[in-house]
Image (cartoon, grey):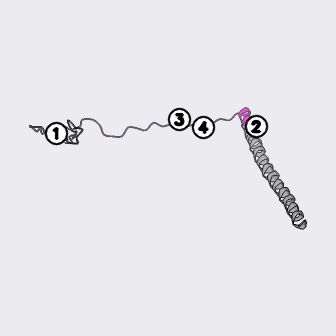
Amino acid sequence: MLRPRVPVNPLPTGTVTPLLQPTATTDAQPVACNHDHTPAPVPVAPGSTVQLTPGSVIALAAGGGAVVLVVGAVLVSMLLAVAITGVSVAVIAVVLRLLVRDMQKGR
């Protein structure tokens, strides 16, 4: 049998008092079970069929269309932001190049 071994009095000095050992041992005999060991029956889930009415099909299609429109608008706006940033950087590069050329000619 497993017996826990917990110190009775751990002292702050690090010295631990020994555990008390039982003086008399008891020999326990295993007890036979008298219940059934067959596994419990698994409950069968009722058929989970989804019945779509014409109204729900229209609502589902409208919802899907709305999601596609929103995602498309977000992606197009991100693409436009990248394009505008690229054009801005290109214009700034051209202006800086012209300024540097003018400064070098003026020497």
Per the image, the residue denoted by label 3 is 46
Per the image, the residue denoted by label 2 is 62
Q: Which residues are magenta?
A: 36-62
Which quadrant would residue 56 be assigned to in this image? top right
Q: Nearer the viewer, mark 4 or mark 1?
A: 1
Q: Earlier in the sequence, mark 1 or mark 2?
A: 1
Q: Is residue 45 magenta?
A: yes
Q: Which mark is residue 19?
A: 1
**Mark 1 crowdedness (10 Å alpha carbons): few <14, some 14-19, many ≥20:** few
Q: Is residue 42 magenta?
A: yes
Q: How many marks?
A: 4
Q: Position of residue 38 (x, y in %)?
A: 33, 40
Check the picture and name the quadrant holding the N terminus.
top left
Check the picture and name the quadrant holding the C terminus.
bottom right
- Quick check: 69 above or below 97? above
Q: Earlier in the sequence, mark 3 or mark 2?
A: 3
Label 3's element? loop
Foreground residue, 82 or 62? 82
Give the residue type at disc 1. Answer: Leu
**Picture residue at 55% right of the left edge, 37% below the top:** 47
Q: Position of residue 90 (x, y in %)?
A: 83, 58
**Mark 3 crowdedness (10 Å alpha carbons): few <14, some 14-19, many ≥20:** few
Asked whether disc 1 touches disc 3, contact meaning CB atoms under 8 Å apart, the reply is: no
Judge from the rendering whether residue 55 lies leftward or rightward of residue 10; answer left or right.
right
Foreground residue, 22 or 31? 22
Give the residue type at disc 3. Answer: Pro
Asked whether disc 1 touches disc 2, contact meaning CB atoms under 8 Å apart, the reply is: no
Give the residue type at disc 4. Answer: Thr
Per the image, the residue denoted by label 4 is 49
Furthest residue in direction left, as rendered = 24
